[in-house]
Structures are given as C-alpha cells and as structure tokens.
Amino acid sequence: MSDTDTGTPPPAPFTRDDYAARMARAARTAAEAGLAGLVVMPGPDLAWLTGYLPTATTERLTLLVLDPDREPTLLVPGLEQGDAAAAPGAGAVAIGGWKDGQDPYAAAAALLRPEGRYGISDSSWAQHLLGLQRALPRTAYAALSEALPMLRAVKDAAELERLAAAGAAADAAYEDVLRVRFAGRRESEIAADLAALLLEHGHSQVDFTVVGSGPNGANPHHEAGERVIRDGDMVVLDFGGLKHGYGSDTTRTVHVGEPTAEERRVHDVVREAQQAGFEAVRPGVACQHVDRVARSVIEQAGYGEYFIHRTGHGIGVTTHEPPYLVEGEELPLVPGMCFSIEPGIYLPGRFGVRIEDIAVCTEDGGRRLNGTPHGMAVVA
C-alpha cells in the first residue's frame, strides 16, 4: 500500500542484518563507555534494537542483554516466545523463555556478570531493576539516557527517509487544517481535525495535538480544551506522531483574522530566532550553541524572559529523545542527528508564538524536514 499523501511506496522494512548491526554497535559502545553491557526492557530502545515490542507491557519480566563478548539474548515470558520469535530482528538474537512459577530474575542473572555495571533502559520498571539487584547484589546500573545518551541519536539513511516522510505528512496535515474554520469552534475540535489529518496522511499514531488559542497559547504544553476560538486570537498549533515507526513534530502559529502590529512583531522575532537557530547547525558545534543563538535573537528583541523552554529535542522512534538543544549540553552535533528547533515567546494572559521544524545535521550544515511557510497564516 502506498502512502496516502504522496502516492509513494512505504520504505523497505528493516532487516535482520539492520538489527544485528544496531545490537553490535550498542554492545561495542557500551564497552567503550566502561560498561559490562546493556540491559534493555520493553520500550523504544528494545523496539529499535530488535524490532520487538510486546503488545502489552506487564509485570512479567522481558529483557534483552547485550554483552560485547556474548551472543545477544532476549529473555521473555514463555507464553510470549512465539511473538518474540516473529519480530523482524529475532534472527539476530537468541531467545530464551521462563515459565510462570519460576524465578525470572534467576534466569536473568545467568545472562549477567555478577559484578558488572550495566546500562539499563530508562523505561525499565523499578520492580524489575530491584529484582535484578536482589539476584545479583554486586551488579550496578546506570540509566541509558545518562550512560549512552547518544545511542539512538545518529540516524542512518533509512531512518532519515522515515523521518522525512513523517515530516512531509505533518506538513500536509498543516496545509489542510488551514482550510477549516477556526472562529466559533473549540480548541478540542481543531485538535481532533489535526489528529484525523495526521492519520489520513499516513501516521499510525498521534502523540499530541496542542491547540493553544488566545491566552492559552502562553502555555507551551497547553492541552486543547473547550475554549471557543474567537476572531482576533493567535493560535499555536503543535502536533505530531509516528509514521513508519518514526516521529513528526511541527509547530506553526496562526491568527484568526488580521493580527495587530504587536502580534506581527512577536511572530517575526520568533521566526528570526528559528532561522538563526537553523543556520547555527553544523557538525562539531555544541548542542547548547544552537539554543544560545536562537535565544539571543529573542533576548535582543526584549522578550528573553518569555522564552521559557529549551530550543529543541531529538526525534526518532520517539518524538522526544536526545540530543537536547539546551544550555549546558556540550555534546557536539554529528551528521545524522535529527532534532527540533522551536523557539517561542509566551506573554502570560495574552498569547504565545512558537515556530518549530525538525532539522537534520548534515556534513556541512543542516537540512529541514518541514517545509511549510514560516510566515503567520491568517485563518477564518
């Protein structure tokens, strides 16, 4: 089946070899970081490494163990072995099972080094981590987001293809929503329109549809509510989800009817900040540099205290992941990193403006994965 928005066929599925290469790289990177290996439980890391994501995450222990000197092993509840064996990366990992009534932590302990220090996925349940520590009290664990924050950050060509398709689909949804009526309708109705459009343009999952009208736009993560949008409102639209397993996330700020001179000025400042942040992208610069460049534009315009969040976040198999474009993050940009650039100004009780694109760091700069105009659209 082709994508509904472009008529192009979906990308080729990831293969056993793709997953084998990811697991080998993850084990090698862990060793380079001084870890005995990785312990990965259900969540985005497990899906990225093996293609396996249990349909229902329960109290039953599921974990992948990656050790640079051993074969990758996936331990699953016995009743779920068939599902695990059907995962696209199953051929690159040994699958073992444990039965109800057995101690799953004893089975897991056999896969770990008794005194090893492991990176463990952030999505792991505390119940399971504590169980591992009881079984092997001399092991130690570090969250993957701290121990290996860049594990999924650098995307290959196949991943970038999926991210570009997700971005194009979000763009198509935005272009369509500009044609609906805003005035006299609730924020929740516009949010429902956006969700339906994302699905229509090929998304399998909608993660968020922020619709912040008038004073609600001054809350960056406003949940679309029952406020009725009125003529004269500024409206922040921030929406995204997953297509082909990879994320979209874009923000545009529109106006119902003609904006005031002040509203245009604030929008122009944010647009200039977003452009400056994008132009700052190049290999080797620290993530915080992009934040500083975008923030300086807003500060010089006199609105610095109203830019109240980081400039961006990574995106991939989740819509928020490392790297983070924020003060204090000194990790350098690397070709293949994909992230949002989304400065904003939020005037309490009045209105907010945010403009967001997903960008990828290239060998000589940056490339946008969103292409809709940055100018303020006027809607009815």
Image: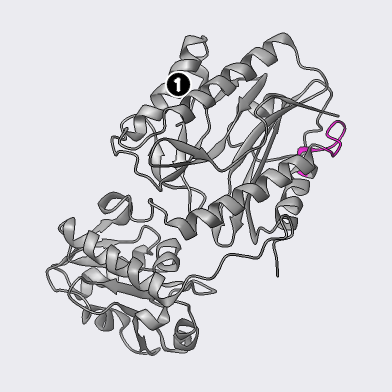
Q: How many labels does the image show?
A: 1
In the rendered image, residue 290, in percent from the top left (x then y), is placed at 40, 29
Q: Which residue is drawn at 52% across and 19% down?
A: 306
Residue 105, quarter of the rendered image: bottom left
Can residue 317 be seen in the rendering of this structure? no
Left or right relative to 290: residue 202: right
Residue most extreme to the front: 364
Q: Does the magenta stretch include residue 113?
A: no
Above or below: residue 42 compared with residue 71: above
- Our reading of the magenta stretch's main secondary structure is loop
Q: Give the range drawn in magenta.
A: 179-188
Can residue 53 be seen in the rendering of this structure? yes
Label 1 is placed on what type of residue?
A: Arg
Q: Which of 68 and 109 lies nearest the eye of the viewer?
A: 68
Q: Give the colour scheme of this rendering.
A: one colour
Q: Which residue is drawn at 39% across and 76% down?
A: 62
In the rendered image, residue 177, in percent from the top left (x then y), is placed at 78, 41
Q: Residue at x 81, y 18 (%)?
A: 258
In the rendered image, residue 190, in percent from the top left (x then y), is placed at 78, 42
Quadrant showing the C terminus:
top right
Q: Residue at x 28, y 35 (%)?
A: 330
* Residue under numbered circle 1: 295
